Image (cartoon, grey):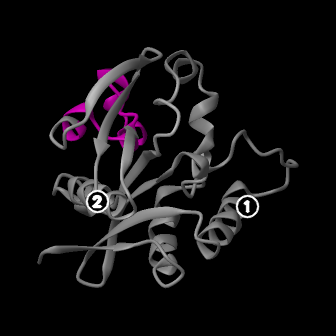
Amino acid sequence: MAYITRELSTRTLPDFEKLAVKQGACWCMYYQRPKPIRRSGSEDPSRINRKDKRTLVTRGRSHAILVYEGKIPVGWCQYGPREELPRIDAGRGYRKVGPPADGERVWRITCFFVDRDHRGKGVAKIALRAALESIEKRGGGVVEAFPVVSEKMAAVPEWRWFGTPGMFRREGFVPVAPLGTSGLLMRKTIVP
């Protein structure tokens, strides 16, 4: 069966939630906050993130591509404009490089998740291409990606959530600068 893609919206939010439960407590909220949230010891971070994600999706301030096999959600790629994903600006390595020139619209691709049973089948590649098409339809700009380059870290499934340099190179991204010892800033310009 061929995979299909859909944008994250209030209609597809239940499908995103099904996958997010499998993924863990993050709910792709880490980069959507300028800094970590403070919580009391009894608060469940997964519950907070789920509530906050729902609010952002309802307000149209959270973007992602969901990948389906038939009607079953099997993966996603989170992307969005710089202002929706501000946490990256706080990174020491990123601050050294800085964002592209003023006036250029900046988009970010921050993470991927693929259901365990569908890994290694091109789901992330399909999600990435659909995200790039969506960015083009929204006016394009400079698209940033942050894949992991450390072989040691890339061997840990959680770190593969950021993608690999190879998958971004195949879509026309070019390396810009290392981000610490394990990451790489890559960029691609999309002109609509």
Is 117 above or below relative to 166?
below
Q: Nearer the viewer, mark 2 or mark 1?
A: 2
Q: Of the residues shown, which amino acid type is indicated by label 1?
A: Ile
User: How busy is the neighbourhood of tag 1: few (under 14 within 10 Å), some, or many (20 plus)?
Assistant: some
Mark 2 vs 1: CB contact within 8 A? no
Magenta highlight range? 145-168
| 141 part of magenta stretch | no
x, y percent for residue 19: 44, 67
Position of residue 163 in the picture relative to residue 172 (left or right): right
Disc number for residue 127 = 2
Q: Quadrant of the C terminus?
A: bottom left
Location of mark 1 (residue): 48
Position of residue 42 in the picture relative to residue 138 (left or right): right
Nearer the observer, 64 or 83: 83
Q: Of the residues shown, which amino acid type is indicated by label 2?
A: Ala
Is 73 above or below relative to 160?
below
x, y percent for residue 122: 17, 56
Position of residue 8 in the picture relative to residue 125 (left or right): right
Name the secondary structure under disc 2. Answer: helix
